[in-house]
Image (cartoon, helix red, strand yellow):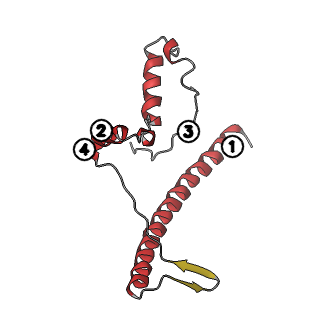
Amino acid sequence: MDNSEKMFELADRLKALHVQKKEVEQNLKDINAELEEVDAALAQLMTDTETQNFTRSGTLFCLTSTIRASAMADRKEELFEALRAEGHGGLIYETVNANSLSAFVREQISENDDVLPEWLNGLVNVFEKTTVGVRKATRK
């Protein structure tokens, strides 16, 4: 097999895997949506019938309740201040979006003669990953 045949074979396989991945991701979304629906319906029925738990085919199903909370988007800084004031600042984590950090570092390298600026040296891991982009060819 020559190189061009091998390249075309790998390209066809890569394209097929991208298609398969999209199908699996969509299937997972569909399953998760149905799972939420069925879970909510079963929880409601168990609540209505005052059934705390039951066993079916060797599996225990039990009604559980959890409280979830999230910061109100427009009041996040106020929440952080209140948490710190009440001695709960340890709950607060600062994060940097990985894609934004990568774009920023690329820009900094580009503006510094293709070298990582000294002030970032030792603070970020930088590596280059070469991949093959796959998209539908435009007709001419």
Q: Is residue 110 above or below residue 28?
A: above
Task: Name the residue beneath numbered marker 1.
Answer: 6
The amino acid on which the numbered mark 4 sits, given as a three-letter code, is: Asp
Q: In the rendered structure, are the residues bearing label 3 and label 4 in contact, judged by CB atoms less than 8 Å apart? A: no
Q: Nearer the viewer, mark 4 or mark 1?
A: 4
Local crowd at mark 4 within 10 Å, few (<14), some, or many (≥20)? few
Q: Residue at x 55, y 17 (%)?
A: 121
Q: Residue furthest front?
A: 86
Q: Are marks 2 and 1 in contact (CB under 8 Å)?
A: no
- Which residue occupies the foreground of this view, 134 or 117? 117
Q: Quadrant of the N terminus?
A: top right
Q: Which mark is residue 132?
A: 3
Task: Determine the CA span between mark 2 and mark 1.
Answer: 56 Å
Secondary element at image label 2: helix
Residue in the image at 30% along x and 38% along y: 77
Viewer-side label of 2, 1: 2
Q: Of callouts 4 and 1, which one flags the residue occurring earlier in the amino acid sequence?
A: 1
Tell me where residue 75 appears, x and y as whole percent: 26, 43
Tag 3 near tag 1, CB within 8 Å: no
Residue found at x 44% / y 83%: 46
**Viewer-proximal residue, 43 or 119?**
43
> Do labels 4 and 2 touch, CB within 8 Å?
no
Q: Which residue extends farthest right?
A: 1
Measured in 3D between alpha carbons, the distance from the residue under mark 4 to the one under mark 1, in whole angstroms, is 54 Å
Q: Residue at x 46, y 45 (%)?
A: 135
Q: Amino acid at mark 1?
A: Lys
Q: Secondary structure at mark 1?
A: helix
The residue to which callout 4 is attached is 74
Residue bearing the label numbered 2: 77
Q: Secondary structure at mark 4?
A: helix
Please identify the quarter of the rendering in which residue 127 is found.
Answer: top right
